């Protein structure tokens, strides 16, 4: 599939999904026949959106240059770090400190008491 066609499908999907959400919101505050009409329109737009994503199992591959990969990794780690829970350690279990410092290892110091 060429990139222009893929972009068109994504745009059509976004448009249909947006319209479905708007009609659902309108149906939530409407009554009687208006509510039924809005729900019917929302269903129609949902069906259009569903036809733009046949099975939802298409794999997406992203290619980065080394610089882009580094920037993406740093951004993801920064985002994850602010969600890290000191009590639960959501990140510490999968991203240990680098370089690791096992308990009991003391840093090497010189005769002047400065770190080596």
Image (cartoon, rainbow, N blue to C red):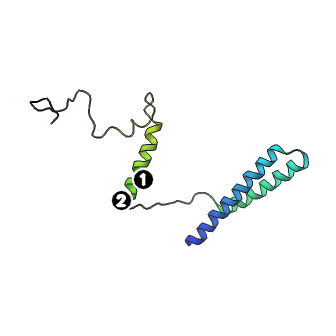
Identify whether 14 is placed above or below 87: below
In this picture, residue 73 sits left or right of residue 59: left
Image point (32%, 38%), residue name: 97
Task: Estimate how packed mark 1 is, as few (under 14), some (14 to 19) or many (20 or more) residues with alpha carbons within 10 Å.
Answer: few
The local secondary structure at tag 2 comes to helix
Image point (43%, 48%), residue name: 75
Task: Estimate how packed mark 2 is, as few (under 14), some (14 to 19) or many (20 or more) residues with alpha carbons within 10 Å.
Answer: few
Identify whether 34 is placed above or below 104: below
Quarter occupied by residue 13? bottom right
Observer-nearest residue: 96 or 23? 23
Dot label at residue 66: 2
Q: Position of residue 17 (x, y in %)?
A: 69, 56
Q: Position of residue 66 (x, y in %)?
A: 35, 59
Dot label at residue 72: 1
| Quadrant of the drawing holding the N terminus | bottom right
Q: Position of residue 8 (x, y in %)?
A: 63, 68
Image point (82%, 43%), residue name: 29
Identify whether 47 is placed above or below 112: below
Observer-nearest residue: 114 or 70? 114
Image point (58%, 57%), residue name: 57
The local secondary structure at tag 1 comes to helix
User: Which tag, 1 or 2, sits closer to the chain's start?
Assistant: 2
Q: CA distance from mark 1 to mark 2?
A: 10 Å
| Quadrant of the drawing holding the C terminus | top left
In this picture, residue 81 sits left or right of residue 55: left
Dot label at residue 64: none
Residue found at the very far right of the displayed protein: 33
Q: Position of residue 22 (x, y in %)?
A: 75, 52
């Amino acid at each position: 599939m060429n990139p222009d066609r893929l972009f068109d499908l994504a745009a059509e999907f976004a448009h249909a999904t947006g319209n479905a959400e708007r009609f659902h919101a309108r149906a939530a505050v409407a009554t009687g026949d208006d509510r039924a009409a809005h729900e019917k329109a929302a269903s129609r737009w949902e069906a259009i959106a569903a036809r733009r994503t046949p099975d939802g199992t298409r794999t997406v591959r992203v290619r980065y240059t080394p610089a882009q990969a580094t920037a993406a990794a740093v951004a993801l780690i920064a985002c994850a770090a602010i969600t890290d829970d000191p009590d639960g350690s959501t990140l510490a279990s999968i991203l240990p400190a680098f370089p690791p410092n096992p308990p009991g290892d003391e840093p090497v110091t010189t005769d002047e008491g400065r770190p080596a």
